Image: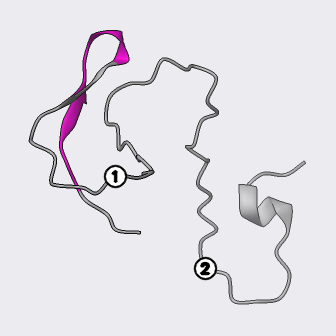
Amino acid sequence: MEAIKVKARVGPNRQLIWLEPMPPLSEGKVEVILLYTGKTESADKPSLKWPILNGGRYLGGTLRREEIYDDAR
């Protein structure tokens, strides 16, 4: 399978509009992968921003919860 890169945009009614001419291709099945930078309509996606924990220096031995979260239960 070969890959080509052609610019396009999404128009009204989600119609794909080619912004440059397609290179000559032989007839047959293809796969299309869209790299989209716009906002999607789905709000059901989980957040991909995980909390970051700064554990400081850890030189081995045991690491207690209080040392990680800097609190006492």
| Amino acid type at image mark 1 | Glu
Q: Is residue 42 left or right of residue 67?
A: left
> Residue 27, labelled with which disc?
1
Expressed as whole percent of the image width and height from the top left, the position of residue 62 reads 86, 81
Crowd rating for badge 2 (residues with CA inside 10 Å; few <14, some 14–19, many 20+):
few
What separation in Å lies between label 2 and label 1 (alpha carbons)? 60 Å
Q: Which residue occupies 15% across, 53% down?
A: 23
10 is within the stretch colored magenta: yes
> Residue 57, labelled with which disc?
2
Expressed as whole percent of the image width and height from the top left, the position of residue 11 reads 25, 17
Above/below status of 43 relative to 7: above
Q: Which residue occupies 55% across, 20% down?
A: 42
Q: Earlier in the sequence, mark 2 or mark 1?
A: 1
Judged from this view, the residue extending furthest toward the right is 73
Helix, strand, or loop for circle 1? loop
Residue numbers of the magenta segment:
5-14
| Amino acid type at image mark 2 | Arg
